[in-house]
Image (spheres, helix red, strand yellow):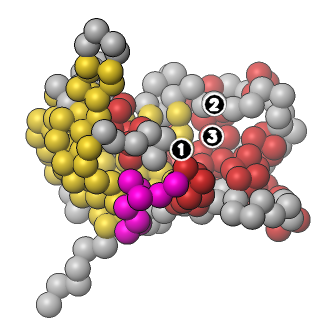
Amino acid sequence: MFAPVRLAAQIVDLHKYYDLGTVVVKALQGVSAEFPEGDYVAIMGSSGSGKSTLLNLLGALDRPTHGKYFLGGHDVSELSDDQLSLIRNHMIGFIFQSYNLIAQYSVLENIEVPLHYRRGNPPISASDVNRCIDLAAEVGLADRLEHRPYQLSGGQQQRVAIARALVNDPEIILADEPTGNLDSATEVEIMQILDRLNREGRTIMMVTHETEIAHHAKRQIHMKDGRIDGEDVFRD
């Protein structure tokens, strides 16, 4: 007997419409997919294909117009905004193309940001700070803890974003064009970190338009006109 596959996330007949007054944009039209624990998937498609809308819904940053989204067994559509915020902060780490660091914060303070949004808002403890320091070292920034974002290269800023994404020990990492603003050498370094995180058991869902970056994933989902247009599986 095979053990049942545990799902990190599942979407069922997902639709997302935007009413612009004179026209309704159907960004997603009946998308269904399963994301097993430990998955490493690249979501690809041209501009307007629905890939970024899908990533926003997977990150619980937006709600579907129709359909179901199950995150860690929870039906997202049944959660209040506060419940959604808590489960998002606990289960998902976000990595953005533009890094989204706070300019006036140091590296260490930027990594600490998600800790301020934990259930019950507990104060940041000495062990929390030590974890942030360890994460900074893990991504090669042990000697940059007091630097501000403007004092860092693009690759270093993305490393801060990765450490920040990991601070609450999430099950899922969502990466939106994580190498889009980086040179090719730094691209390699960032993807090595993501590859290692997946080998350690993290589920990674990544939007990218770069074929070479997508080949780091175990599979690719191709989007077109708000639908899944195909899937490629590379390895188990």
> Looking at the image, which residue is at 30% across and 48% down?
41
Q: Write down the residue under mark 3.
A: 161
Task: State the separation of the CA atoms marked 2 and 1.
Answer: 10 Å
Quarter where residue 221 is shown: top left
Element marked by disc 3: helix
> Looking at the image, which residue is at 45% across and 47% down?
60
> Looking at the image, which residue is at 34% across and 15% down?
20
Task: State the separation of the CA atoms marked 2 and 3.
Answer: 8 Å
Up-down: is 12 above or below 45?
Answer: below
Residue 226 x/y as whole percent: 20, 30
For the residue pair 49 and 21, the one nearer the viewer reads as 21
Which stretch appears magenta? 71-80
For the residue pair 32 and 62, the one nearer the viewer reads as 62
Up-down: is 122 above or below 135?
Answer: below
Looking at the image, residue 37 sits to the left or right of residue 12; the answer is right
Is the C-beta separation of discs 2 and 3 under 8 Å? yes
Three-letter code, disc 1? Phe
Up-down: is 148 above or below 54?
Answer: above
Q: Which mark is residue 94?
A: 1
